[in-house]
Image (cartoon, helix red, strand yellow):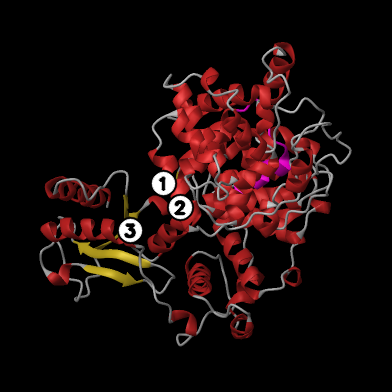
Amino acid sequence: MLGLQRFAGSIVTQIYRRAAYSSNVRSASGPLATAATGQGTEMSETEARTPATDAKKPKGQLVAAAFESLRNESPKDEKKTPASSSIDERIINAKSVNGLLAITENNNAFSRQHALRIVSILAEWSTVDRVKIAEFENDTRFLRICRMLGRTVPKNGGGNNKNNGAANGSSKRISGFRTDDLNTVLGVAGDDEAAKLIASISLPQMVKVMSTLAQRKRRSTPLLRSLAFNISSASEPLDLKQSADVLYAMATLNFQDSVLSAKVCADVQAALPKNVDKSAVVGSILTSLGILRYRDLDILESLTQWLVKNSEICRPQDLSAYFLTSSLLNFKSALLEDVSNKLAKSIVREDFTKQSEWLSYVWSLTMLGLVEHKHLDSVLSPGFLEKLEKDKSGLTPVSKMRLLNLNSYAQLLATDYKGVLLPADSPAYQVPMAHTKTKQILVNGMLDALKSLLPATNHVQTSVDSKMGFLIDALCQFDANRNPLPLDKENPNAIKVALMVIDFHDICHGTHRSASGVTNLTIDLLEKSGYQVIPVPYNEFSTSDKLLKRVQYLDAKFKAIVRSK
């Protein structure tokens, strides 16, 4: 399907070959939407690739004025009028070229969106040989559409100017639907039609479209898939700013694409050595990788090397982004000693304006094994909790769970920690915890199977609040012969078992898949609490499996634990 979309773009190129400007006007890219702005990326206007302002205007052509007026056009949400809706319906129901082009006649409500839809349909019909381009390329109604899209036609219609037409067509690929038309591409009624036009635009313009989708929070799957395919297929590499913009758009729209992510990461590695003075774009890339849970050890190691080498120019928030992403992706660099000495020790509490940011930083250090006693003491003290409550966001459930993680870490995993701990009546313990709907379905499937093995109600506890910042999906215990024991009676020789469902969001994706740092921390805390942990990953245990298969899976896990004791 994507291949057909790409081929459709080449057909549109042929359609417009004689309608292209024979001038030096460039496709105006405009400042790229600063997709990484939300993460602190700062790039100069030169790097943002502002359009050339000294381009020559085409002479003696009807649309020169239209081109200039459209250059600064801003996107607007058009309200559908009855006349516009009627045109949409006629376009959908048109069965022939004449039927499509007749819509343009004596119709004041006909807009650029309608023009793009007609062009898209003609392109699709051309690819399947339903129509021939020669049937309409010189039709005055089609030429009107060309003019609406900001193009004009030579007086001879291009028929006797083959060399000029071929040169312009091959070099410009219809000039990629000018940046002015990108707003129309994004505003076109059907996402499928817009997706077919993506192959016709340049790589910088594709990045801009993706950034604009992120800014508008518009998760158009057909458009995103087309953009992912065409950006991944481009031989031209992305620069560091463009890579940051693409990753930020993917993170904002929660759009996972392994091929596009691999392309972006490869381009980042190639461009990274050339960046000698901007840590913001590196921080943006790191933040997006963490949000996407995309784990590629090569790019993470390259980013680590860059930060260590350029530590003096790195902003605290960019270093904090590194630690948070590394912890979430369960990544420990080969340069961990340098990371600890050069990066971690350069960050102090005063670098953060929000208490929650300092809490996140300390929390990330625990998963990397770099936390110090002074860090734990600073967030577990009563004074810190009071300051955290005064933050604009207040004491959120996420902050409470992280505090509980740290409190448990200090008790169970920190060596010789003598500092303060959360009091038993701390408000951090008052946190509502529940699984997402998709994870709860998997948990219910596991519990159904567990009932077949442990039918007595006092043999199993479910959805147990660990008081460590997470739920335990199921608890049970056995004797040495694998006989279930009641949980309401103390048995010092019992083998305590905790079952934890691992769903899609509990693992890292990408080139080097693994459990996330949070998942590993959860298992470490449970093991230190005296439990034998049985992870139940979604790719091994499915609710679509028959109950017998699920029961056999859990039974085999129980046998393995008892044998190991």
Quarter of the figure with the N terminus: top left
Relative to 10, say whether 250 is above or below: below
Question: Mark 2 near mark 1, Cβ–Cβ under 8 Å?
Answer: yes
Q: Residues within 10 Å of mark 1 (few under 14, many from 20)?
A: few
Seen at 62% across and 63% down, the residue is 371
Q: CA distance from mark 3 to mark 1?
A: 42 Å
| Amino acid at pointer 3 | Lys
- Asked whether residue 31 appears in the rendered view, the answer is no
Seen at 60% across and 29% down, the residue is 140
| Extreme-bottom residue of the structure | 425
Q: Pick the residue in front: 80 or 435.
A: 80
Residue at disc 3, secondary structure: helix
Q: Give the label, 3 or 1, closer to the camera.
A: 1
Magenta part, dominant SS: helix
Q: Residues within 10 Å of mark 2 (few under 14, many from 20)?
A: few
| Amino acid at pointer 2 | Ser
Q: Pick the residue in front: 257 or 100.
A: 100
- Identify the residue position indicated by label 2 in the image: 85
Q: Quadrant of residue 341?
A: bottom right
Can you tell which mark lies on residue 269?
A: none
Question: Mark 2 near mark 3, Cβ–Cβ under 8 Å?
Answer: no
Percent coordinates x, y for residue 339 in the rendering: 70, 51
Question: Mark 3 near mark 1, Cβ–Cβ under 8 Å?
Answer: no
Q: Is residue 247 magenta-colored?
A: yes
Whichever of labels 3 and 1 marks the residue nearer the N terminus, that label is: 1
Magenta span: 234-248
- Identify the residue position indicated by label 1 in the image: 89
Q: Is residue 65 magenta-colored?
A: no
- Identify the residue position indicated by label 3 in the image: 439
